[in-house]
Amino acid sequence: MEDKKKVIFSGIQPSGNLTIGNYYGAIKNWVKLQDEYDCFYCVVDMHAITVRQEPKDLRRRTLEVLSLYVAAGVDPDKNTLFIQSHVPAHAEIAWLLNCYTYIGELSRMTQFKDKSARYGDASVSAGLFDYPALMAGDILLYNTDLVPVGIDQKQHIELTRDLAERFNNIYSPTLTIPEIYLGETGAKVMDLQEPTKKMSKSSDNPNSYILMMDPAEVIRKKISRSVTDSIGVVKYSDEQPGIKNLMTLLNCATGMSFEAMEKKYEGQGYAQFKIDVAEALIADLEPIQKRARELVEDKEQLEAIYRKGADKASAVANKTVRKMMKKIGFIPR
Ligand code: ATP
Ligand code: LTN
């Protein structure tokens, strides 16, 4: 029997500097998956332009995100690493899927509701509204089985499944129905200032997030200023969202269990605990930061990585688009 590896697809938007939410919620899990699965990891620049981007920032960030993937341990020889706009099939499938997606479905997406409220109606583009169809296309192009993302993306994955099933029912089985893949911990890293909200790279308050590239001093300061509570006990509980989040971070950085933390910091308040969280994050991030700084300067190596990735990705993606077009009734060229 042929032992075909299952396919994984995921991506991050180059719409800001990556946070430790992106790292622990997404990239760190990708590294664990690369031996067992056939993985496609994309820098989704076409998603980023759903809100206005400064061209030179978009260019810089796209290469930074790719560098961080590699620096964090996502091996370009084992995985297909590429930039979304280099594979035109993404735009093609997005149009096709558009025509099978209902306005009612898109209107129910909580990410759209949140973002459109934030940007105000006048600057809400059709692209922002339609973004889930593009995301569904990203996933469906590669016959993806599993999509490792943070829990905030669950609704988009469900829509992807609905669209794939709809297409298959109208025509005949064509698209693979994907499933969400959630890592054990770190599925959701919370905002350091408002720990009931998800940490986000597009937040206006820099104290609310830690960037993957933040220097040690900045990490220490942000953790020491993070919002906790007046209970004074290190305990993993929904009543203490700030402490719960810091415990999650310590667990992500060191693997230490919540039970062990509760024991270790018993009767000590929060000061030492916060110091330890900051130092653990620094130790986890420093080697990645060093490699990322080197790689982002090495334009040739980066170019070799994203070109090879785009070639590999296009071969698979074009096949899916052709298959869909044929079933829809387009004349093959
Ligand atoms: P934005 O705030 O600009 O909407 P984002 O920080 O949510 O962006 P995305 O590019 O939308 O980042 O997400 C990339 C990946 O990182 C997704 O898999 C998402 O689930 C994950 N992710 C983002 N923020 C967090 C977080 N706070 N905790 C866990 N995972 C996260
Ligand atoms: N919408 C995603 C980014 C993204 C994505 C994807 C993730 C775009 N296309 C395909 C997984 C698979 C987000 O995290 N905001």
Image (cartoon, rainbow, N blue to C red):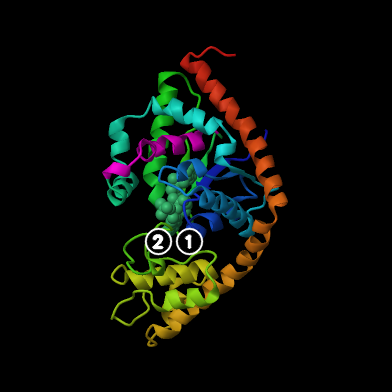
Image disc number at residue 291: none
Pinpoint residue 269: horizontal percent, then vertical percent.
Answer: 37, 85
Three-letter code, disc 2: Met
- Residue at 45% across, 25% down: 96
Pinpoint residue 328: horizontal percent, then vertical percent.
Answer: 47, 17
Q: Is residue 144 left or right of residue 128?
A: right
Pinpoint residue 112: horizontal percent, then vertical percent.
Answer: 33, 44
Q: Say whether mark 2 is within 8 Å of ligand 1.
A: yes
Q: Say whether mark 1 is within 8 Å of ligand 1.
A: yes
Pinpoint residue 23: horizontal percent, then vertical percent.
Answer: 52, 59
- Residue at 52% across, 16% down: 326
Residues under numbered marks 2 and 1 in contact, where contact means CB atoms less than 8 Å apart:
yes
Span highlighted in magenta in the image: 121-141
Q: Secondary structure at mark 2?
A: loop
Q: Looking at the image, is 54 positioned above or below residue 285?
A: above
Q: Nearer the viewer, residue 78 or 307?
A: 307
Ligand 1 picture quarter: bottom left
Residue 49 counted in the magenta span: no
Residue 134 counted in the magenta span: yes
- Residue at 33% across, 75% down: 228
Three-letter code, disc 1: Thr
Image disc number at residue 199: 2
How far apart, in angstroms, are the residues tagged by discs 2 and 1? 8 Å
Query: Can you identify the residue that label 1 sits on?
Result: 19
